[in-house]
Amino acid sequence: MPSKPAISYAHITKRFGSLTAVDDVSLDIAEGEFLAIVGGSGSGKTTLLRLANRLIEVDGGTITVEGEDVRNVDPVALRRRIGYVFQAGGLFPHLSVADNIGITPKLLGAPVASIAARVDELLALVQLDRDAHRDRLPEALSGGQRQRVGVARALAAKPRIVLMDEPFGALDPLTRDALGDDYRSLHRKLGLTTVMITHDMTEAILLADRIAVMRGGKLLAQGTPAELSNSSDAYVLELLRTPRRQVERLNALLPQGGAA
Amino acid sequence: MSLFTDPRWGEALSHLPDYLGNHVRVSLAALVLGLAVSLPLAILTRNRPAPRTVLLALASIVQTVPGLALLALFYPLLLLAASVTLAWFGVSFSAFGFLPAMLALALYSMLPVLRNGITGLNGIDPALVEAAKGVGMTTRQSLIMVELPLALPVMMAGIRTAAVWVIGTATLSTPIGQSSLGNYIFAGLQTQNWVFVLFGCVASAALALAVDQLLGLIEGGLRQRSRLRSGLGAAGIAALVAATLVPTMGRSSSGYVVGAKTFAEQYVLSALMRDRLRAAGLPATTRSGLGSSVVFGALKAGDIDLYVDYSGTLWANQLHRTDIKPRAELIAELKTALAQDNIVLLGELGFENAYALVMPKKRAEALGIHTITDLAAHASTLSIAGDYEFFSRPEWAALQKAYGLSFRAQRQMQPDFMYAAVASGEVDVIAGYTSDGLIAKYDLVALDDPRHAIPPYDAILLLAPKRAGDERLQAALRPLLGKIDIATMREANLRASGNDANSSPDAVARWLWEKVGGR
């Protein structure tokens, strides 16, 4: 890989009691890359993500973020410079949309006026109407709108790295598709490095540059969709079979669009 | 006279600013202190199951202690603490009134605050706590910006419960010297002034209800994230506190404080002495309904300036003497002993209020009982009732020893109900008071004590050490000394036990002064 890795996992192990959640995983995520980590529940994918910003601490191995060993970085400072999009938004229900989005800049001590300007900028970026949504509480938003706020909040402090924990999992297919596309273009436009957790291989293929497949705490394979299809691992091939089958069935069921 | 034109309503109302103000002051201080202790404890223990269990168990135990007992316990506890700080640091504080009441009530308020605080904090969605961490909050920022605001509605419900408990229980702080709406209830019960009892109950219930509704408004506002509702509730609370505290704020507390124990005679005598002081141009107030053991300590510490006690009571309870001396000798010895504590025994009022075994005259004659010796022969078939302290007093032990008394049953009763109980035959004998007007009213007889097991109980006027050299005070009181004979006091007590407009302690005190003032 030509550029230096934004995040590098080297021989990472994490145990919860007798359970080994992550077992000797090594993985590099290049700067500007969009990586999807795919696996079933209990595969260790979420644990791997949380280790990167020290929401949980590693038991063995070394993680570096932008070249620095995370153990040498204050965890709070680390989290403030890495964007994090939570499953189902994780918005604070007692704070308005604007306060939710502006939280990390506020923690960093940014002036009120600059936070307000940044919030407006971000609302535009995630395509939410400023006047309609700015002062609302999260409970007044739809699921898709909430997740857009979640993305805006993650981007507020202008991080170079964004971690996403099944960000679009709970949304209806149309919203999910739109939001995925919108995020993908933001990723490119802002030059972000993104690591996204998903259990949905189709979503991973459509959004990510590269895919890492996890199962039982181990990293089974990593690579572009094309590279993965050459894998010899039965589980990886099984995961790839689902989107293929879907495509075949869709092609069979739907008349080819645009044929005049 | 109609219930509504009864002048005692007016008298009750005239005490309201003082009683309500003090009630709110002690309740508010107790709640603030309770919150200041409980909330940090709830926060500290929210993730530590073992200390949390211990803490909640302790708070629950406190809750099972009856309110009156908890308040009463704090008085000797603080007396002890005050003597320790005096010995070690040379500073002392008053163990009387506000401080013990506030501390006991604060302790009482802790359980609901702790329980709801912990429940509220633990009930927060863990995903939100993780999100707080994820956006870069420190543990403290997460607590202040996310966890506490989210737990607030549940915490507020606990604060609301605590407030209602404290306001209700504060009525019990009267016997340890803290004025409260309980003054109405205690005074009313002792003098059978049902207007006062009713007034006190309604006033404290109304206060509790108002606070509950206003805090409920705040709680609802927090739940629905409506600033308007929370603001209205908070403004209501602020207005209520201001309205109740401001009227008594400017008053000087430099006047003389006349203490009174918990029975009608004491209420009348304290009102009489207060009137005498005021007539002499000395500002004076009464502090009534004080526990028998509290009142002497309060005088010694200077929390009250004067009160009337009875020679035999001090002889047994303060000097711990079990021997009996003739009246004059006992008073002389008492005077010397009290002088060592710089307490002034100004003199006797002229009557004696001794314990006496009392029964219906007709019944006594039918059984041929004239003395306690005669009674002892029948005692095993008879029942006896006494006030709340009688059976634990040395006089009772002395009586039992001297006459070999052993009754079939013994009961404790509210003093004013005893006489009616013995007259109706519900009990056979009561330990009454010789100065009580009800003895004549119910045609009862006090049995002779040929072996002098009961010491003399001359009513004596005591002054606090700091008033030892106060000539104006002593001059104002001297006209009372030796002037109140037993017949007059009995009549006064009988009047005070009535249930009409002229039976309030103030009215009886005025009547009493008219009788004895010209003597």
Image (cartoon, coloured by chain):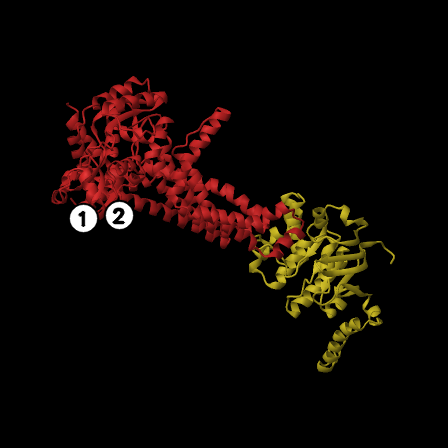
**How far from the left and from the top, in percent, is residue B14?**
27, 36
Colour in which chain A is drawn? yellow
Q: Which residue is mark 1?
A: B425
Q: Which residue is mark 2?
A: B409
Residue B22 horizontal side relative to residue B282, left or right: right
Name the residue type under label 1: Gly
| Front in this rendered view, residue B190 or B459 | B459
Label 2 resides on the chain identified as: B
Quadrant in which the C terminus of chain B is drawn? top left
Residue A59 horizontal side relative to residue B101, left or right: right
**How far from the left and from the top, in percent, is residue A135?**
57, 53
Q: Is residue B287 above or below residue A48?
A: above
Q: Label 1 vs label 2: CA separation?
A: 14 Å
Crowdedness near tag 2: few (<14), some (14–19) or many (≥20) residues, C-alpha within 10 Å: some
**How far from the left and from the top, in percent, is residue B141?**
62, 46
Residue B185 horizontal side relative to residue B245, left or right: left
Colour in which chain B is drawn? red
**Regarding mark 2 in the picture, which secondary structure is present there?**
strand
The residue positioned 51% from the left and 44% from the top of the image is B38
| Front in this rendered view, residue B153 or B398 | B398
Name the residue type under label 2: Ala
Quick one: which residue is furthest to the right in this view? Answer: A2
Whether residue B473 is visible to the viewer of this picture, yes or no, is yes
Q: Earlier in the sequence, mark 1 or mark 2?
A: 2
Q: Is residue B371 above or below residue B341?
A: below
Q: Quadrant of residue B19?
A: top left
Whether residue A260 is visible to the viewer of this picture, yes or no, is no
Q: Quadrant of residue B508?
A: top left
